Amino acid sequence: MLADLLYSLKDIEFTFNLFGYISFRSGLSLVSSFFLVIFLMPHWIRIQQSFFPSGQPIRNDGPKTHYHKKGTPTLGGVLILFSIILSTIIWSSNFSIFNYILILTLILFGLIGFFDDYQKVKLGKGISSKTKFLYQLIATVIIFFTIKHYGFDLNKFNIPFLKDTSIELGYFYFALILLIIIGSTNATNLTDGLDGLVSMPLIFVFLTFAIFAYILGNINFSEYLLVNYIKGSGEIVIFSTSAIGALLGFLWFNSSPASIFMGDTGSQSLGASLAVTSILLKQEIVLAVAGGLFVIETISVILQVSYFKFSKGKRLFLMAPLHHHYEKKGLSEQKIVIRFWILSFLFCLLALSLLKIR
């Protein structure tokens, strides 16, 4: 799009040669998406307050500190997705097929999340878990066949810390993709429970995958680090930095006390896009490591539900997901958020270390 047009002018003015570099375009995509959110979000908040004055419903059995959040606009994810998609389209070169698939993922899961959010603000209750799972399953199948249609390898599962080692999964890889995408979608959604909590971990994980994409898409770096070169995957950096910019802009308004929430529109679609990024880069294990915070939050819910059933009504945690447990113990929201950010940062550093463990 615009990046290609500007790059075509390099013979007229040498400065336009910069638009041929992913590193330069990634910076532009980050800044573009950031300022799109910064400038448009105040207007978007006012629109929601006019059309959906009831805002975010609050659970009666939740922490009492959340009661004051009732009525907060909850469709921030719509603007996040708009900014990511627009910035990616503008700054991608030849509109990479990698980014086409990632944008498709954002749209499909964003629509599911939007439908759920809309039901909440209009009826006070979102769609049922079974219906949501069915929609997520359909979206995942569409994404799977789209990836397959464009010739991506959907048989081998790479082991990142072993040189040139992969496992042939055949048709079982489809089941793994279902687990990765739906699992990541809901794990991110579960983590989005406190002001600013999910935004920064998402930024860290997108940054981690931006680094992986840059290395895997560069034949010299991939050979040096003994990782599989994936032609064209460097363009994923543009999508990732667009997401980082949009999330930074959103965090400007979502930091405590939040003026707006991203809702399922944002959390589900961003979680799904991270999963698809890991699949396109053949770095599924990296997602589990970098997204360690999301994994912990999900495990806490699974353990809580299982223990409640088998113990006939007893609870393992005061409340799940885990961040609510610490709220119930009396920790301030800001302290929990900062500590979880630190954990997420450490998980991402561990994921990056996998580049050298071979």
Image (spheres, grey):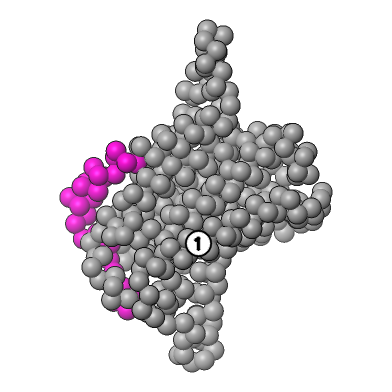
Magenta range is: 37-62
Reply above or below: 162 against 296.
Answer: above
Residue 57 x %, y %: 27, 66
In screen coordinates, is 11 left or right of 258? right
Name the residue carrying label 1. 342
Toward which corner of the image does residue 287 lie, by quadrant?
Answer: bottom right
Residue at the extreme right: 164
Residue at the extreme top: 12
Residue 312 x %, y %: 49, 92
Residue 105 x %, y %: 51, 46
Toward which corner of the image does residue 219 lie, by quadrant?
Answer: top right
Residue 339 x %, y %: 46, 66
Q: Amino acid at mark 1?
A: Ile
Residue ID at (29%, 44%) = 41
In screen coordinates, is 275 left or right of 78? right
Number of other residues with Cα within 10 Å of mark 1, as a class: few under 14, some 14 to 19, many 20 or more: some
Q: Give the secondary structure at mark 1.
A: helix
Q: Nearer the viewer, residue 233 or 203?
A: 203
Q: In the rendered image, is residue 292 in sight?
A: yes
Question: Quick check: is 216 in the magenta stretch?
Answer: no
Residue ID at (55%, 12%) = 14
Q: In the rendered image, is residue 136 in sight?
A: no
Question: Quick check: is 42 in the magenta stretch?
Answer: yes
In screen coordinates, is 303 left or right of 51? right
Reply above or below: 25 against 195.
Answer: above
Residue ID at (23%, 61%) = 71
